[in-house]
Amino acid sequence: MTVRGLWIISHENGGNLSIRFSRRFSTVEHRAKSLAGSSYVAVPEESTFLQLLLTELGLSDSGKNYVALRDDCLYRPRSPALELHVDGPGKGILWPVLTVSQGPLILACLPLVDVPPDPRPPLASLLSVSQGLTLLAGLQTFLLGSGSKPDSEGLGSRLAMLPSVLLQVCPLGTPLDVPLPGTPATPTAPTSAGTQKQPAWKTGLHRGRAVVNVGLIETVRSMQYGNRSRQDLWDVYGTVTCKCEVEGVLPNVTVTLSLPPNGSPLQDILVHPCVTSLDSSILTASSVDNYDGSAFSGPYKFPFSPPLEPFRLCSYTSEVPVPPILGSYQLKEEENQLRVSVTLKLHESIKNSFEFCNAHLPFFNRDQMGVVDMKLSSGQLDVSKEKNLLVWILGQKFPKSREVTMEGKISFSGPTPGPSDPLCTKLTAYVKLHFKVPDMTLSGCYVDQHSVQVYSSAKPRIVTSRELQSKEYYIWNSTGTAPVSSGQMMM
């Protein structure tokens, strides 16, 4: 949530209302202009803004019984989100201008709405409105203190402190917190994440039992060629994400990653800045260096003071002996037909329980797909002739043999050409696998629920999960050419 501008209005000695403080944020305004495009409405000058706001609040032209913009029966005020009708070169409606009034003060801000203005979204769907109002309420408490009518000297001193205070609580128009009564004007050193409190502007404060979620996701990639002259490649990249939902002060937490007895050490470990201490040996293992078997093999302990939002605790790579699914793909051209043969074998170490497992076979630079005659040992086939695509849906389990095959012929005799690709010409083709395996990782790495330590009296519920998923998992046609990389695959 960001704000385009902030205004504080109060009575002068003569009784007239005037802007006592204002702040605009040019970076947010630039973003508002980019988002709105041709419907962008610029924030007018201070005097114009004040007049428009007072008219909308019914505080101007008090001697006139009727003002069209204010009193017309077609006008329906939507307090506290007001709309200001701006005239001139950048004319239009400025919305939503939020206001909070108490005692001698009127506080207003213009939050950035990052959804299309037409049709206008309902206020209840805009999180920036509720957050903006809470920000104004916090500033109001800071300025007025415990009473609603502070003396002019006290109000003046707090208004003088606002520029320094906003640097801390709303840098560059992004509210991080609200100032408390008596906040010092001098900058303070940033506090550690372990003493952070939920920002007062952040709606949706966690209620109920505290929860700490730790999720481990490993992503495997592979390039398989089915040719002895080309070396197959695969790699594993893991990430650990955390989310701490605790009311009030966030506690210190320690998460431990463990490996099975025969597991390969984790490599290329990167950690979030919130990690407070770390054994230096954890960071020494690198996939670039030759592995000599002496690398630290766990357990890997990560003590940290969590930030308020979900975050990535660490990432790593791992060397595994084989990819989870080994494949073979052969294409042979016969007149205007292709003979297709695909074999997939699930490795014995992989859990035979998928959330999903699909194989995509695209065919490029050919006429539109015609007759498809395929025999499957398992699963079902989805044919998209418009896209020249076969989708082999393998479901959630391989058969007991852990091997599946697909064989048959495809003709290309459609009236229109199919999709093109500059790389996949002639017999250069591939099978791309998409799969996800819950409750397992290829490296064997896991987070034991009982190893997560939370230093808090709240005794939060610990939730851990892990999964293996594919990304860029290719099996190339062994009878055609294929792109070959001589170096390491990079995530």
Image (cartoon, rainbow, N blue to C red):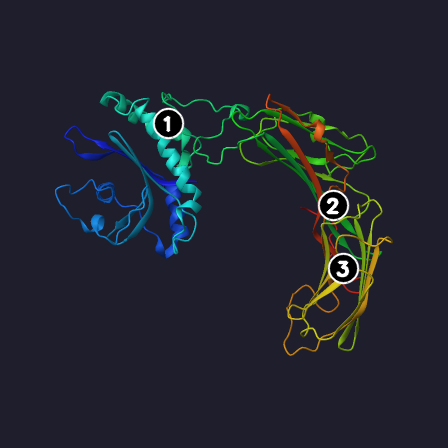
Residue name at image x 80 percent, y 48 percent: 352
Residue 395: which numbered mark, if any?
none
Circle nearer the viewer, 3 or 1 = 1
Say if mark 2 contacts mark 3, CB within 8 Å.
no
For image coordinates 42% across by 45% down, the residue present is 124
Density class for disc 3 (Cα within 10 Å; few <14, some 14-19, many ≥20) is many
Q: Could you classify mark 1 by the number of other residues whose Cα lies within 10 Å: few (under 14), some (14-19), or many (20 or more)? A: many
Badge 1 amino acid:
Val
Mark 2 or mark 1, which has the lower sequence index? Answer: 1
Q: Is residue 402 left or right of residue 198?
A: right
User: Quick one: SS at disc 2?
Assistant: strand
Q: Tell me what residue is drawn at x 43 percent, y 22 percent.
A: 188
Q: Secondary structure at mark 3?
A: strand
Crowding at dot 2, Cα within 10 Å, few <14 / some 14-19 / many 20+, comes out as: many
- Residue topped by disc 3: 476
CA separation in Å, label 2 and label 1 = 49 Å
Residue 468 in which image quadrant: top right
- The answer to whether residue 250 is above or below residue 30 is above
Give the residue at mark 1. Answer: 165
Q: Three-letter amino acid code at disc 3?
A: Trp
Q: Nearer the viewer, residue 69 or 300?
A: 69
Disc sitting over residue 235 in the figure: 2
